[in-house]
């Protein structure tokens, strides 16, 4: 009998991750609490980006991505369907149009394509 293939989803982390930043040493629950407690005008984008780049549970990474103030920092993560959706929702300027069109054409994730399509419609209605 063959074994079931291992899931690609990351499990919930209960504790420290040696050699990581202060945020990554926290459990997922504490990390989520810290992310949600950040003020609207924080200067923690680079620490949050470490969480996005980590192998933490997708929900933790997505919540970190939502709190990053400079959406352009997420461009390297457009291939991740959870982060890609957050990325495109932060792109609201007409200068972002080309990148959104590229994501719409190239993303393999339906959720990212739909979010890019919605953002493009929003940008186009602003410019017309």
Image (tube, grey):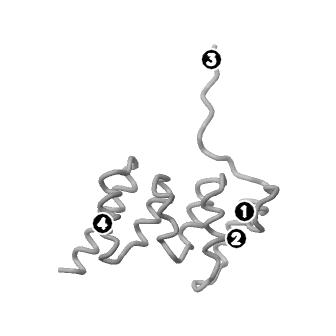
Tag nearer the camera, 4 or 3: 4
Residue picked out by circle 1: 29
Location of residue 17 by image quarter: bottom right
In the picture, the quarter occupied by the N terminus is: top right
Inter-mark Cα distance, 1 to 4: 37 Å
The answer to whether residue 126 is left or right of residue 62 is left
Residue picked out by circle 4: 98
> Looking at the image, do the residues carrying marks 2 and 4 touch, with CB atoms under 8 Å apart?
no
Q: Residue at x 70, y 73 (%)?
A: 34
> Looking at the image, do the residues carrying marks 4 and 3 touch, with CB atoms under 8 Å apart?
no
Tag nearer the camera, 1 or 4: 4
The numbered mark, 1 or 3, whose residue comes first in the sequence reads 3
Tag nearer the camera, 2 or 4: 4
Inter-mark Cα distance, 4 to 3: 47 Å
Q: Please state the horizontal and vertical placement of residue 78, each as a whole percent of the image.
A: 46, 57
The numbered mark, 4 or 3, whose residue comes first in the sequence reads 3
The numbered mark, 3 or 2, whose residue comes first in the sequence reads 3
Crowd band around label 4 with a 10 angstrom C-alpha radius: few (<14), some (14–19), many (20+) = few
Q: Residue at x 29, y 61 (%)?
A: 101
Camera-nearest residue between 27 and 99: 99
Residue picked out by circle 2: 33
Q: Which mark is residue 2?
A: 3
> Looking at the image, do the residues carrying marks 1 and 2 touch, with CB atoms under 8 Å apart?
yes
> Looking at the image, do the residues carrying marks 3 and 2 touch, with CB atoms under 8 Å apart?
no
């Amino acid at each position: 009998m063959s074994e079931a293939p291992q899931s690609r989803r990351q499990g919930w982390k209960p504790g420290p991750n040696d050699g990581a930043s202060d945020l990554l040493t926290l459990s997922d629950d504490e990390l989520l609490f810290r992310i949600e407690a950040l003020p609207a005008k924080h200067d923690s984008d680079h620490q949050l980006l470490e969480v996005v780049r980590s192998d933490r549970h997708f929900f933790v990474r997505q919540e970190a991505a939502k709190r990053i103030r400079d959406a352009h920092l997420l461009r390297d993560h457009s291939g991740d369907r959870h982060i890609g959706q957050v990325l495109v929702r932060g792109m609201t300027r007409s200068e972002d149009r080309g990148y959104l069109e590229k994501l719409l054409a190239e993303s393999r994730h339906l959720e990212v394509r739909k979010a890019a399509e919605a953002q493009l419609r929003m940008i186009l209605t602003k410019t017309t």
